Image (cartoon, rainbow, N blue to C red):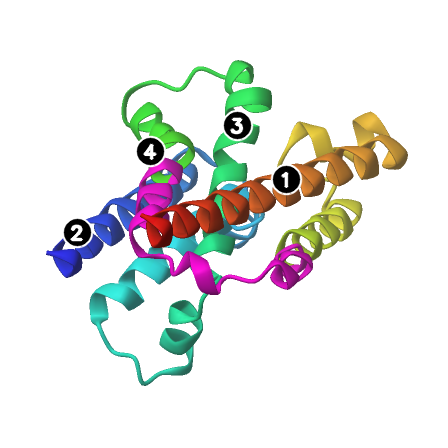
Amino acid sequence: MKKTWTIIAAAIVWFAVVAQLCLMLQNTSTDIVSSIVRFFSYFTILTNSLVAIYFSVLAWGKDNTRLARLFHRPGTLTAITVYILVVGLVYQIVLRGIWEPEGLQRLVDELLHSFNPLLVLVFWISLENKNKVEWRLLPYWLIYPALYLLIILLLGEITAFYPYPFVDVSTLGLARVLMNSFYVLMLMLCIAAVLLAVGKYVVKRSMAA
């Protein structure tokens, strides 16, 4: 049953990512290479792709690869959950009001930003070995988003394209963008701390019962 649900989850997330790529290529005014680079400049896409790969590896059921061992390591699912929850929260709080997608785009949008974060949270509740996730891992979980922010700022300086309005240096200035980036990283750290605290509390309660 676990494998069946993991396959379904992988299919849903892959559908959302691939459908978004097709929709973007269908409506782009730039060349295909530039469009693909822009597509993968979104934290939403990178993180949903990470989620899709994670579910796919779990569904495959092979534990003898380096990637499988990484994904089965305590804390990996928690980190992925933090990333995708930030995708959902930032979208709901900051980005939802700036556009109104319709048709297939609306479905894909809701999958990427609403359904998939909740889906991963459910898997975290069910699968993560919360007692073995250590607090010392928190700073390491910020490496991925910090590198992402650095790369998109460097690419933005070269291409003048910024994937999100709150990191648009040309409009907001570098100081404001750095502050916004700091807020996002702190949000991520807070969510990670909450997940760890809740996870350890639940484990402690279950052991005491």
Q: Residue at x 75, y 47 (%)?
A: 153
Return the x and y of residue 97 as percentages of the image width and height. Answer: 53, 14
Q: Earlier in the sequence, mark 3 or mark 1?
A: 3
Residue interval drawn in magenta: 117-143
Return the x and y of residue 94 as percentages of the image width and height. Answer: 60, 22
- Mark 3 to mark 1 CA distance (whole Å): 17 Å
Q: Residue furthest bottom?
A: 64
Q: Are marks 3 and 1 in contact (CB under 8 Å)?
A: no
Q: Is residue 170 left or right of residue 86?
A: right
Q: Amino acid at mark 4?
A: Phe
- Looking at the rendered structure, the number of numbered marks drawn on it comes to 4
* Residue in the foreground of this view, choosing between 60 and 79: 79
Q: Is residue 154 left or right of residue 2?
A: right
Q: Amino acid at mark 3?
A: Tyr
- Mark 3 to mark 2 CA distance (whole Å): 26 Å
**Label annotation for residue 91:** 3
